[in-house]
Amino acid sequence: MKFMSNIAHINEKSKEIMTNINNKIFMYLFHILSDNESLIDGRKVDQINLNEIPSKIQNIILPILEELKEQNETLSAEEFLIASQQIYLTLPFDYKQFLMEWYLAKNNSKKQDTFRDLADLTFKVIRVLYFLFFTNLLYEFLLQMISISQKLRNFG
């Protein structure tokens, strides 16, 4: 009996994790589609650049965009999320899988870019530290040379 309750708990937790991932996917799509990241405007649907979105995913969201355009309405992030979740429930498994793989690939690409930027920043910081270190060494060396020069002047 305890085993069955653990399975139910795991399944509920898995469902929650998948819902969170799906919400991230749809919010990512919303930010691509929205004008200033606050609304998708039905009057501007034709101006949306869909080049970042594969055609298979465009087919998923086109019904939402077409309805917005026909009704000349706007859609907030929350409304888009609700509509996307409803459409997601009707999708065949291969579409769901493609959507997930696309998002993970995009997210992984962003992480690689972030890592590359972080590595560049680290390299720049190291260069500045070396510069400061060697500048300090040069300063100390010059001070010693001036001191020796003054001693030689006073000596001679």
Image: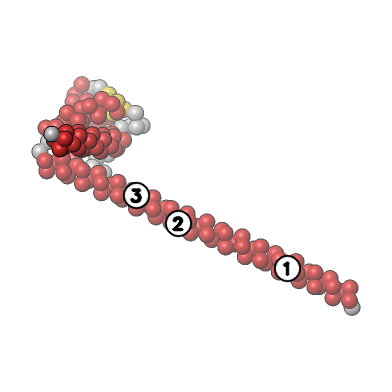
Give the answer, above or below, for where 17 lies relative to 110: above
The residue shown at (21%, 43%) is 100
Query: Where is the N terminus found, in terms of image quarters?
Result: top left
Tags 1 and 3 in contact by the CB under 8 Å rule? Answer: no
Image position, residue 66 (x, y; %): 18, 29
Element marked by disc 2 = helix
Callout 1: few (<14), some (14-19), or many (20+) C-alpha neighbours within 10 Å? few
Query: Where is the C terminus found, in terms of image quarters?
Result: bottom right
Residue type for callout 1: Leu
User: Which quarter of the picture shows residue 99?
Assistant: top left
Element marked by disc 3 = helix
For residue 41, the mark is none
How far apart are the alpha carbons under marks 1 and 3? 46 Å
Image position, residue 151 (x, y; %): 84, 73
Question: Which of 140/153 is in front?
Answer: 140
User: What colour scheme governs how the chains and residues are painted in the rendered image of this protein?
Assistant: secondary structure
Q: Which residue is tagged 1?
A: 142
How far apart are the alpha carbons under marks 3 and 2? 14 Å
Left or right for 63, reference 43? left
Q: Which residue is tagged 3?
A: 111
Residue type for callout 2: Asp
Q: Which residue is tagged 2?
A: 120
